Image: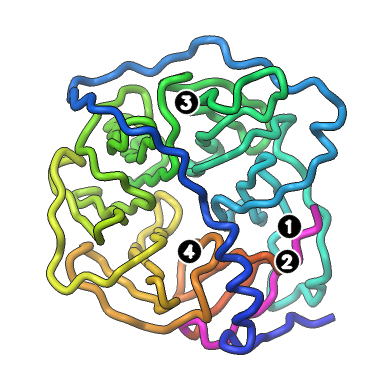
Amino acid sequence: MTPQPFDARTRAAALLAAAALLLAGCATAISDGADAPVQADVASAPEQASAPEQADVLPTRIAALDIDETAGVIRVATDRGIYVATLPDTDTDTDTAARSTTLLGDRVDDVKSYQRLGARVLISGHPNDPEVSADERLGLWVGDTESGEWAPFALTGEVDFHAITAAGSTAVDAIIAAADTVSNSVFYSPDGGESWQKGAVIGATSLAFTSDGSALVAVTPVGLKVSTDRGRAFVEPEAAPALQLLATPPVGTKEWRIVGVDSAGALWSSTDGERWQQFGALAAVPAALALGTSGEAIYVATADGVFVSSDGGETLTLLVTLDW
């Protein structure tokens, strides 16, 4: 079958259903405002769920979407781990039927945030283990996209990041920012996650860097905020749209832009986080938003699958019907 175009405005029901999949907050505010670097922690991880029935539970929520054109795959972060499906080439691959998805490794964590850095991925959230409290925090874990192996990486048991973003010329020298729901603080790492500094308490739910990392954009409960001092302080840009989700290309991409979707589904873009231009619209806020390495294409994940649009959301073409 050929790739199937869908008028975005006729798919309101499907996209509205996807809005229910948006990341649910589980923040518990604390008043720790320390700004000292926190070194990466490689302590032992919570034991992986051993009950056979854990592997049989299907995902119900999408946390993030990753378009990896180099590897030719789509990765979807869910409340049951990271699932991988083949990325179809819309020029040569005419089959967009339901594709089998595979779990990246053997972990079925409740993933709340996700960021890829080259061949490794960073996640945060909670372990799906019946023997572990639901409040247990993963901290930050790292996974190898080729081997599927996972290991604790930083801040184990300390943080619950619900948003992660990164920027840099290469994945090796990337800077990272993350939003912690335990402290409601922004965390910043200048060295790829090896060390961390705690910043402003703003309750961010989505984050994005400008191309050089000089500005950090944050979606907060009181509007869009921008920091130019590594997340220590944030200010509100003039006439900022009421964005709900932010997305940037993979680290190392030359054609860099920040794309956001507001509460009405309108699509906005910016290169500096201060000035925003509307370029299209979706019927509603999707579960996840992603960009590729080039062009004007945007990718969205909904309950129906993963779609791509090259005309500002006017037409959504089905890439993958997720088959858990």
Local secondary structure at mark 4 = strand
Q: Quadrant of residue 147?
A: top right
Q: Magenta segment, principal secondary structure?
A: strand
Q: CA distance from mark 4 to mark 2?
A: 16 Å
Circle 4 crowding by C-alpha within 10 Å: few under 14, some 14–19, many from 20: many
* Between discs 4 and 1, the one toward the N terminus: 1
Q: Which mark is residue 69?
A: none
Q: Which residue is mark 3?
A: 139
Q: Which residue is mark 1?
A: 86
Q: CA distance from mark 4 to mark 3?
A: 26 Å
Q: Which residue is mark 2?
A: 320
Q: Amino acid at mark 4?
A: Leu
- Asked whether disc 4 touches disc 1, contact meaning CB atoms under 8 Å apart, the reply is no
Which percent across, then down, holds residue 77? 61, 47
Local secondary structure at mark 2 = strand
Q: CA distance from mark 1 to mark 3?
A: 29 Å
Q: Amino acid at mark 3?
A: Gly
Local secondary structure at mark 3 = loop
Q: Which residue is mark 4?
A: 291
* Between discs 4 and 3, the one toward the N terminus: 3
Which percent across, then down, holds residue 267? 40, 76
- Asked whether disc 2 touches disc 3, contact meaning CB atoms under 8 Å apart, the reply is no
